[in-house]
Image (cartoon, helix red, strand yellow):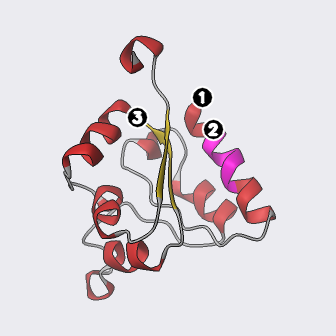
Amino acid sequence: IAAYKACELLRRLTESGHDVRVVPTAASLHFVGAATWSALSGHSVSDEVWQDVHEVPHVRTGQEADLVVVAPATADMLAKAAHGLADDLLTNTLLTARCPVVFAPAMHTEMWE
């Protein structure tokens, strides 16, 4: 459910005039496909660190952002971010971000508590 709410969040942000870049995890693409993210954001979408390696997308995206929003932020994502693990495009982007990062936790209540 949280993944579909992220689509609504993206739609509202873009309708408000924000330029939003989507950096999905491979797991998130099982719920909402890259074509949907691309259509809603108006930008191409990739979850690969090594795609467009000449442009170093995780560094560019992290450094150009005014704000990074991780929504939904799973327990796994929160743990990776807390420990500085970078095994995908999103976590690599988080390490290069020079702006505020907002996490919107989304998990079963027992996992949160």
- Give the left or right position of residue 85, taking residue 39 as reference: left
Which residue is labeled 2 in the image? Answer: 4
Q: Which residue lies furthest to the top in this view?
A: 110
Occupied quadrant, residue 4: top right
Q: Do the residues labelled 2 and 1 touch (CB within 8 Å)?
A: yes
x then y, percent, for residue 109: 47, 14
Q: Quadrant of the C terminus?
A: top left
Q: Which mark is residue 37?
A: none
- Residue at image position (59%, 73%) is 43
Tag 2 or tag 3, which sits nearer the N-term? 2
Residue in front for this viewpoint, 60 or 7: 60
Occupied quadrant, residue 99: bottom left
Which residue is labeled 1 in the image? Answer: 1
- Give the left or right position of residue 24, taking residue 17 as reference: left
User: Helix, strand, or loop for circle 1?
Assistant: loop
- Tell me, yes or no, whether the highlighted magenta stretch contains residue 92: no
Which residue is labeled 3 in the image? Answer: 74
Q: Do the residues labelled 3 and 2 touch (CB within 8 Å)?
A: no
What span is colored magenta in the figure?
5-10
The amino acid pointed to by label 3 is: Thr
x then y, percent, for residue 8: 71, 46
- Residue at image position (20%, 54%) is 87
Cα separation between marks 2 and 1: 5 Å
- Residue at image position (40%, 78%) is 63
